[in-house]
Image: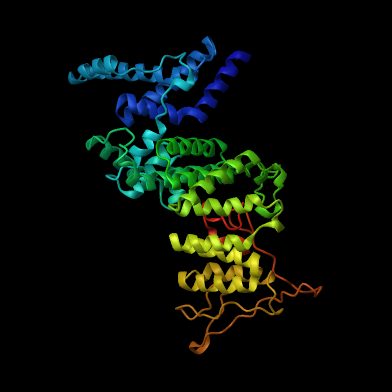
Amino acid sequence: MTAGADAARQAVEAVYRADSRRVLATLIRLLGDSERAEEALHDAFTAAMRQWPREGVPANPRAWLVSTGRFKAIDAIRRRARHEASLTAFADELERTVQAPAPDDDDAALPDDRLRLIFTCCHPALPSDARMALTLREVCGLTTEEIARAFLTTASTIAQRIVRAKGKIRDARIPYQVPTEADLPERLDTVLHVIYLMFNEGYAATAGDSVTRADLSAEAIRLGRLLLDLLPDPETQGLLALMLLHESRRRARVSPNGDVVLLDDQDRARWDRPLIAEGQRLVERSLASRRFGPYTLQGAIAAVHADARTARDTDWRQIVGLYDALLRAEPAPVFELNRAVAVAMWRGPVEALALIDAILRSAGSWSGGCASYPSAHERASHPPWCRAPDRAGADGRQPGCGAGNRGGRSRRTRVAPLCPARPRCHAPRARRHPHGDEPAGECQLLLPPDARAGRGT
């Protein structure tokens, strides 16, 4: 293979990674059917693999792929028309009324159809779980296996949800369009959630060799900007601010070895200050509206972190106050736990452990919580002999500790001495988080990355 042909093939692969979902979104709009558009997408990339090494990479690869995919789809419909006469008229109509971009059109002149596709995937006629699965597949390009891991279910279940959702869109003739201005507000929450899911997958990838996926995060931010232009709602501002403030830390989040670097250990000189400034302006505008919600409050928490030149300079008191407001707006154990982390940094770990104790009791998460107590107590100013929480499980065993409970009495379990002053202390080493990111004492019960606003990465 010549150097030019090899470069062309690499260009095809790069365009597929960066733009395949945008090409698909436009083909769905042009062809009116997701399955037909997916087939056209694959045909277009197959043609690119054959032609680009011989003819060179076109000036605008995305426009070339859209145009080629449209022609391939029309040709496929005409072939099938030999067996179904009604398809002939449909192919003629597509060729006459649907205009694809010219292969050399300027990229800026091409319509952006991914926001249109998100609104279609998030249509209220579809079940909630199907909306999420369909969007992650069609818009983000995640595989069914990756989506299944996110939903803690099987790939076959996700595949069925996606097939049913596509069938519903087809049978109900749900249009591929951005809703009218009157309908936008009631559809906004789901779309914001989906864009944030896309950003999170890019910020902390659930699959693959890389810890992050910059392409997905960048696409989520781009869609957030488009949505803000379409509907300048305070929460749209808040979400965009939250994504920008997290994105500003990307270069400092991963070590040269590919490991995640926790917030306290990051080189803040590597943070992207222009992104921080933009995110902080958006937070201020949203807060000034007095109509903000959870995304804005999470963005405000991220802005406080961004204000601190060092980890020690962080205004934890303000962060605790913001979590109080966030819990009033959207009560959730995730936010309670993050608030407890902020309390630990502001007032000390003893008070925070009492809060975490109450959270675990109300959530019933004792088996996972008990295992984290030794490392948590190690950081607290407790007496050298610490005890696991005094509560027996239904089977008469101390939750998470493996100790029997004789005679129906709850028995506390003595753990290793934690005093750092003793050279033979046997202080328990912090277990590693199953995902390898942080010690178990900080794992926040395996929370997703979007839940780690208090003290995360």
**Image coordinates for residue 434, horizontal then vertical, percent:** 58, 56
Q: Does the rendering let one see residue 150?
A: yes
Name the spot of residue 207 as percent of width and height, x first.
Answer: 53, 44
Answer above or below: position of 151 versus 32: below
Report the number of discs.
0
Q: Nearer the viewer, residue 453 or 210?
A: 453
Residue with the most extreme right position = 423
The answer to whether one can see residue 440 in this image is no
Q: Is residue 109 above or below residue 319?
A: above
Q: Residue at x 54, y 64 (%)?
A: 337
Residue 42 placement, left or right of 183: right
Residue 155 located left or right of residue 323: left
Instruction: Please indicate whether residue 226 sits to the left or right of residue 267 in the image.
Output: left
Q: Give the residue displayed 24% in from the left and 17% down from the top.
A: 93
Up/down of 453 relative to 365, above or below = above
Q: In the image, what residue occupies the spot 49% across and 19% down?
A: 61
User: x%, y% of residue 445?
Assistant: 54, 62
Q: Position of residue 109 (x, y in %)?
A: 44, 20
Please name whichever residue, 166 or 399, is drawn nearer the observer in this view of the structure. Answer: 166
Q: Nearer the viewer, residue 347 or 388?
A: 347
Snapshot quadrant of residue 72? top left
Observer-nearest residue: 59 or 53? 59
Q: Residue furthest bottom?
A: 407
**Residue at x 61% of width, y 73% of height:** 351
Look at the image and name its color scheme: rainbow
Q: Quadrant of residue 421?
A: bottom right
271 left or right, relative to 139: right
